[in-house]
Structure formats: structure tokens, C-alpha cells
Image (cartoon, grey):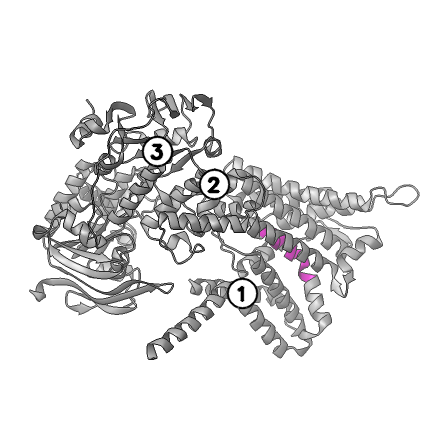
Amino acid sequence: MIAVESRAENRALELLKGIWRNYSVLVVFVGIIGICAIAAPRFLRMDNLLNILRNTSTVGAIALGMTFVIIAGGIDLSSGPVLATAGAVLILLQRMVNADGTPAVPLALAIVACLAVATSFGFLNGIIITKAKLPPFIVTLAVGIMARSLVMYFMRGATVMGNNIPQFTRIGNGSVFSIPIPFLLVVGVAIIFHILLTRTKFGTYVFAVGGNENAARYSGIKVDRIRIATYMIVGLCTGMAATIEMSRMAAVAAATSGSQYEFEAITAVIVGGTSLTGGKGRLIGSIVGFIILGIVNNMMIMLNISPYLSGCVKGAVILFAVLMQRRER
Amino acid sequence: MSNAAVLQMKGICKSFFGVEVLHNVDFGVDKGEIMGLCGENGAGKSTLMKILSGIHAQDAGEVIFKGSVIRRNATPLEMQRVGVSMIHQELILLNELTIAQNIFLCREPRGAAGLINFNRMNEDAARILSKLGEKIDPKRKVRDLKIAQKQMVEIAKAIAFNVELLVMDEPTSALTGKETKILFDLISSLSAQGIAVVYISHRLKEIIDVCHKVTVLRDGHFVATKNVADVTAHEIATLMVGREVKESKASDFPGDPNAVVLEVRGVSDDLLKDVGFKVRRGEILGFSGLIGAGRTELMEVVFGIRKPRTGSVFIEGKPVTIRSAIDAIRVDLGFVTEDRKETGLVLCRDIVDNANYVSWLKNPGMFKGAKATMENTRRIIDRLAIRCSSPAQNVSNLSGGNQQKVALSKWLLSGAKVLVLDEPTRGVDVGARQEIYQIIRELAAEGVAIVIVSSDLPEILSICERVIVMHEGRITGTLNASELSEAKVMYYATDV
């Protein structure tokens, strides 16, 4: 009898361990929300929660793409500068007007150009990394530095205001059924990406390339193409982030637009449980990851803590998340 | 006699992910004794030794070394300090460091101001290597070494410091006959100095040759410890699998000699010199030779991994261009590589993924098709008798033989017409080895042309219908099964 009971107990324990192994980030997420609700009752108000979702959408979009890159064993440090570059293209196009005051470039075309520029940067990163066989860290760092410098040069380091186009402003600031449009966009892309990652061959190959590049190559997988594709995906996501950011800010700042966003996105992915060594990871983790970062930012304001300390808290969150993931093994 | 015991392991239990891999195992070694450790894949040999060397902690039971109980969570470094050294089956050297740095890792000789004394380190390393009969510059990086040389570095690392107990997990799997002989002399001399050795091998002949006693494990249970003088290799094999094992010998290829599926002509590069061969539908062709004869390189050329200077490939009489693995896959070639960890498997992914990579590539469409994928995976798990908790189990948690079956499965699921198997049973035990031979025979009977590269002569003899022998990039002889003997193969392999 005792043996039977202990087996049942074991099974319950295994089940709990299984939940923890697969959903630890969600457990931590619920815990954080609980703590926040106690520390600042205003935190749970609907308008505050929706505000958090709106504010995290930019980094969130980048984090979605970054998940692909990191699972494939890469990294992209150029996202922030690329956001500024693509954003600058968007703002410059949308503020061009004809003599009669109507927009010279259709808004849709300006957005497509923004997405195309950002995706091209991803392609550039991918081509250099795979063809020149250089480490992604160095290539994307260099490309990022160059992108930022070019934006600074062409905009003379200034901030440029966009024209006030209501449809454009609505992308970043509007809501549908009181849910922020940028968050809906991110969720929509996340659903497509989740299917891409878990149901398609491409997604499996992304995991294979990150897990063991040689074995992937010996299995006939076109490793270079897969890697380039992941950088193009993060590029496209950065273009989407640029569109949201430009819509919300109605301006692009050569020096500061998108600054540090690549690190925020990487942080979100790591907190979400994706392995930096590649081969393992989940999109849902990254989503929870960027929302956790948003909550941290929000709570700093709620609790009236100096924004200068937000780095301390985020650093601690990274260490805590990674420690937790280590213990699962 | 018990005071002569250097190691006693009592009632050791260990589970991984709820699967018990060791059940109440007792194991002991006396001073200066050479103890063989045998068992099928998954029998728990490696796990037992990993507990001994501090890599895993046991769930229950105790380890007593030289009369004192070792604490349960002892680290590998602590175990090294008390005198336990282990040479792992899969080499764990740091490729970017030199040979000497690897040998003295964490134990570097210090000079003035506590800095590493590189001169002394290199001299000591050279001395240890020469004791092993290896005249190689200790300042070379490990990355540039051949696999047999890496093995020697591993051994040098293990004996560089005072050891009381040396564990060797399949140390000869990549060694040539000559190197094996040197190793055996070395083991005997260590034993004469009072050092105990635990020798894990699937080559039972070696156990008989070098060991005093042998302990057999089966499915995580202790089976028996015997004096080697009292048992035959056949009896050990029977203890391991728990049933009678039959050795078989291949006969000549009975099929149509004109049904050539794959023909390779005039392959030359830095190593290979005008090499060509044919393999027919349903034929099992072996490639024998010493390490470095160019057999693996030839197969890499055929599979598009290695670029030759000259050479052409014909599939069913038609010339084909193979520039990469995907080209080879398109003409239904399959390649089970010799190093499954490096090039065969994505260890951090599950059986489903690893078994289906190639068939996904071959089938049209962008979606995997969850249902068909799962059915295929279950079918192949059944067919190859892959022992796993579920298809979603990570390949890294499988034992060597089961990993090898997964590496094989991706080519079976994709319907390869020609299957190249490079060292198909390396690190695989007797039982699983017979299973793999059986699978190979079945595939051949179904019409798949099989090419086996193997350094294991008994393996070549027991399964291949025709054998091509290579020496230093050249084909030196071709033998049919009926005229095949170890002596003839060695004659061609060591050059005429």
C-alpha cells in the first residue's frame, strides 16, 4: 500500500516538475503579476495593463524575430539602429507632399518601404555571416554601428517630425475593442510565427541548424539559407517595430530612436527560456518575456523609483530567469 | 582479501527522468586488478562509471574508495584527486588548446609568481606521450589531430598524475591494431604498478586478452563477476544478452551482378588517388583499411561534402552532379556518418525531428504533417526496436546504440536506394550490434545497395558480401566473401 501511495506521490511530483519544466516562465509571470498587484494596487487597473501592452509592442515585435535568430544559434545586435534607419525612411517618405498639400507617397507605400529597408538589413547581415563565415555577434554589431552612423549623417543628427496623418497615427495609438492596435499586430504576427516555428519544415530546420549545424548540413538542410531567412525575419519584425514606433512618436530621432532595443529584445527572448546556444526555445516564452520587461518598466514608474535604476532590475530579472532555467535541467 | 579492494560500489541505484538505469548494482575492483565491464547498450556501464568519476550522483548506495566512503556529490575534480581517472568513450578534449594544455588542464605546473611553466609542461607532456609510443609535438592544437591521436592524448591526460584507478570506456574503438597493442602493454604495466583498471569494451576478445576479471551488467542489474580464465567470449556475450548469440558469416552476393546502382569513377584529391567502385542493388559492400586510408573521405566525396579534384558519380548508369548533401539526397543516397554526435544527430532535439529531417526535405509542401510524421516515427521506432520513453524524447538521453538507430532511421524513412554506413556499430554493444546487422541484411534483401566502412574486421567478415581494401588513398584489393579472411584483409590494408 505504501509503495502504491509513494508511486502516486511520485507521479504528482513528476507532473508538477513537468509543468515547471515546460511553463516555468508562465509560473514566474503569474508570480510577478501577484507581487505587483500587492505592491501597487493601481497596477491591476485595466487602463494600466493595456498601457503596458501598448508600450511593449515595439520591443515585442523585435523579440519575435529575435527568437528565430537565437534558436538558429545566431544573434542580432543591429536591431536598434536598423529601426532608426527604417523609421527615418518612413518619416521622410510620409512627410513628402505635393504642391497642393496632399501626400506625395501613399502611406502604404511608405510603410512597405520601411519594412523593405529593415528586411534588407537582415538579408545583409545574413549574407555576410554565412558567406564570409564571420560570427553573428561581430557582423551585426558592425552593421548596426554603420546603420546608426548613416542615419546620423543623412539627418545631421537631428530629430525629424513626421506629418500628421490620422490613419498613420492610429497604427500606434488606436485601439480595437479597447485593445491597443500595436499589441494586436504583435499577437497576429506571433500566431503566424508560432505556426511557422512548430508546424512547418522551415521551423524544424531552424531548430536543427541551431542544435547542430553539421548534422543539419549532412541531412541535406540548406543551412545558409535557413540562417539568412532568420535574419530577414528579425529585419522584417524590426521594420514593423519601426512603423509602430514612428506612428506613436510621430518623429524619428537620429541618435536615440530604437536605442538599446536590441538588448531589450534579446533580454525578452532569454527570459522567455530560449537557449542562447541555439536549438531550443519557444515563441510564447519570448512574448511573456517582453511583457515582463514592460511590467518592470511600469512598476518603476508606479512605485516612483528612479528610471536610472531600471537597468538594475532588468539585469536581476535576466539573472533570475537564467538561474531558474539552469535548475530545471 | 577485502583489504586489497581499492574500490567498492554497493547497492548503487540511479534513475533519469523516471527511468531506472541502475538497480542495486554492486561492483568492486582490487588493487592492480584489470576489471572488464560488459553489458549491452543501456545496461548502465557508462552511468555506473560516471557515478564513480563524479559526473553523476547516485540516488542510493555508496562508493567506498580505499576504505573511505566518498561523499555522494563528489565532483570530478575531487575524484581525480583521490585517484580516480576516467577516459570517456566520446573524447572530451578542448580543440583549441594544445596537447600539453589538454593533458595538464587544471593541473598545470606552476613556475615563478604562480604563472604556468609552459616549458616544463610541454616537456612533461612529450615524456608522457613517448611512454605511449606517440611521437607528436605537444605544442600542436588538438583540433588538428586525427581521432586515434586524440585518443592517445586522452590516455596521456588520464595517466599524467598519480592514479589508483583508471576507467577506460571503449578506448580502442578508434585505434588501429598496433595502437591497441601499445595500449594493452601499457594497461598491463599500470596493473603491475598496482593501479587498478576498469576496462569497458564491446570487443569481448579484448576483454579476454587484457582483463583479469569481468563484470557483466544487464538492463541496469548486476549479472555476474567471473575470472576471465574461466569464461569464453561466447559465454560473456550470452551473459550480456541473457540468451544464446549466434555468429554468422556472409556469403557471396547472390543477386544480379549487372544491376549497378552506384558507380564512382576516378576520384582524386590530396589524399585519394584515382579511386572508383561499383555497388549493386541489394549488395552489401565493405570498405576495410587502417585509420587514415581515405575510406571516410571517399564517402564524403560521394555524398557531396568533400570536393574532389577529379571524379564522377553514376546512379543507375546515368552521370549525376553532386555538389552538396541535398544533391546526394535527391538521387536517393544516404550517409550514416561515423561521428553521430558531430554530424549525425541534432542531440538537443527529439527522435521525431531527427528521424524525419530527410523525408521532410524530400516531400513537397511547407508543413510537416503532424499525423504522418508521428506515424512514420512510431513505425521506425518499432521496426528498429529503438528503446525510448516516447518519440518526443531528446536524442541526447538515448544510449549509443539507440542513437545510432535514430541516425539510421532518417535514411530509412526517406527511402534511400544506396546507404553508406561509416563505422555503423562504433560504441554499440553486442546485442544492438546484431540488431543493426539484421536491419542491414533486411535492407539489402529489400534491394537497397549497402556500403559499409568499418575498422572492425570481424564485423566486415560477418556481414559484407564483397570487401574493398584501401591503403593511403588507394584501393589495394577487392575480395569476395568466399575468399575473405582477416589475414588477407590485413595484407592489403598494410600495403603490398
Badge 2, how many Cα within 10 Å: few under 14, some, many 20+?
A: many
Badge 3, how many Cα within 10 Å: few under 14, some, many 20+?
A: many
- Reading the image, the residue beneath label 2 is B358
Please tell me whether mark 3 sits on a helix, a strand or a loop: strand
Nearest the camera: B476 or A301?
B476
Magenta stretch, overall SS: helix
Please tell me whether mark 2 sits on a helix, a strand or a loop: helix
Residue B276, located in which quarter of the rendered image? Answer: top left
Dot label at residue A25: 1
Residue B51 pos. (x, y %): 27, 61
Structural distance between the alpha carbons of marks 3 and 1: 48 Å
In the image, what residue occupies the spot 66% across and 78% down?
A41
- Report if residue B117 is visible in the image: no
Q: Amino acid at mark 2?
A: Val
Whether label 3 touches label 1, CB < 8 Å: no
Dot label at residue B450: 3
Structural distance between the alpha carbons of marks 1 and 2: 33 Å
Nearest the camera: B364 or B108?
B364
Tell me, yes or no, whether the highlighted magenta stretch contains residue A325.
no
Q: Which residues are magenta?
A: A55-66
Residue B30, located in which quarter of the rendered image? Answer: bottom left
Q: Amino acid at mark 1?
A: Val
